Amino acid sequence: MAERKDVTKVVLAYSGGLDTSIILKWLQETYACEIVTFTADLGQGEELAPAREKALAMGVKPENIFIDDLREEFVRDFVFPMFRANTLYEGQYLLGTSIARPLIAKRQIEIAAMVGADAVCHGATGKGNDQVRFEVAYYALKPDVKVIAPWREWSFQGRPDLIAYAKKHNIPIARGKEQEAPFSIDANLLHTSSEGLVLEDPAVETPDLVTKRTDRRTITPEEAPDRADVVTLTFERGDLVAIDGQAMKAHELLKTLNDLGKTHGIGGLDLVENRFVGMKSRGYYETPGGTILWHGHRAIESITLDRGAMHLKDELMPRYASLIYNGMWFTPERRMLQAAIDASQDAVSGDVRLKLYKGGVRTIGRASPYSLYSKALVGFDEAGGYDQKDAEGFIKLNALRLRIEAERNKKVGRNE
């Protein structure tokens, strides 16, 4: 906990919503310090301009309001490096929330340096992962920074206390916000996650008010049209650079994939994950574009990566995924793994054709000028320089230790 007397200026991660507006007022009252608000545009699909007006209405100086478009940096410098590793947490989760936190923290620290702030503040609760992700990143980038985490400091016990505080201080409450929302949503260009309340029983199917809300990222496979679409993804050195031959910026590529994925009901996931704070959490995740991208990258690697390199990457990936999930982006071990992953991508270039249909993504073609696939070697009707007799020696050498052990087992009476 930061010492209140030592904080003169704080940079608040501010969405403009009710919770962070309450935090803004609480900071003004509790710390009596100058407030700087920072709102990140990560492609969450919300109108961010009102955040400026709300901050101004609450007394924040115009020069202390930052609304930054980080979409390109987010995809180029965080999402794409993660996808070079084919990253999945616990075999399913594409880490849409986790990968956004280090960028938000990085920009907060940059703004703090620009305005001379001595503290940063986030709105993550004391039960979740995000408090760790934010604060580990803060300390990695500015070791002496003061961190304010209101949910670990204030005396509010729940939604009624927050609403009462908002009314007391004339903080606007949007229609329907007086009651606790049926679930919470976190969104960015890579994904949308829904958690809490109506999703807290993992034995009950995700309810329609989650999967069929108006702002959803995906439709269900049942709603998808009875029509398949084929899309061609072009990769260079492991990164997506074009869709159907059209080159675009990184964030535009991901948005295009999102639109395609939503059309075909791709990327919805009902998941129970292990939070690193010690509890299991159930959520509904929507990652349409990321799901297509993951399949496409895996497909181009299948013909351009050597077997040893691919298998080593598969071994490293769970460790890499855990580092991101646990908020360890700005660590030596993540940088070491990233260097190894990136070194494997030198020849991961070419085109992949994918068929999209009712929630599914299927590879139907892949080609690369750097392909390691040899039809001459693998074909049934061609020798291709491969002498099938060589296999006999290979087999016998690999079986040699087993033959020796089998002879030994006869002496000790073992028959297996």
Image (tube, helix red, strand yellow):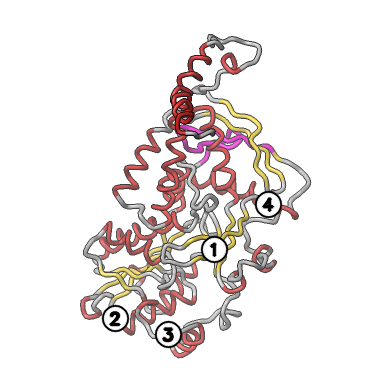
- Residue 156, disc: 3
Specify the quadrant that holds the C terminus.
top right
Spatial CA distance of label 4 from label 2 is 47 Å
Spatial CA distance of label 4 from label 1 is 22 Å
Q: In the rendering, at what x and y percent does residue 337 appear?
A: 36, 42
Nearest to viewer (mark 1 / mark 3)? 3
Mark 1 or mark 2, earlier in chain: 2
Q: In the rendering, at what x and y percent does residue 411 appear?
A: 45, 29
Is 296 rendered above or below residue 38? above
Spatial CA distance of label 3 from label 4 is 40 Å
Residues shaded magenta:
230-248
Q: Is there a contact, CB below 8 Å, between mark 1 and mark 2?
A: no
Is 231 rendered above or below residue 377? below
Nearest to viewer (mark 4 / mark 2)? 4
Residue linked to disc 2: 31
Q: Please name the amino acid that badge 4 sits on.
A: Gly
Nearest to viewer (mark 1 / mark 2)? 2
Q: Please name the amino acid that badge 3 sits on.
A: Phe
Residue linked to disc 1: 46
Inspect the magenta stretch and tell me whether residue 159 lies in it: no
Residue linked to disc 4: 265
Spatial CA distance of label 3 from label 2 is 16 Å
Inspect the magenta stretch and tell me whether residue 244 lies in it: yes
Residue closest to the eye, 321 or 32: 321
Query: Could you say whether the residue bearing mark 4 is in a helix, strand or loop?
Result: loop
Q: Please name the amino acid that badge 1 sits on.
A: Glu
Q: In the rendering, at what x and y percent does residue 378 appear?
A: 59, 18
Mark 3 or mark 4, earlier in chain: 3
Nearest to viewer (mark 4 / mark 1)? 4
Is 226 rendered above or below residue 134? above
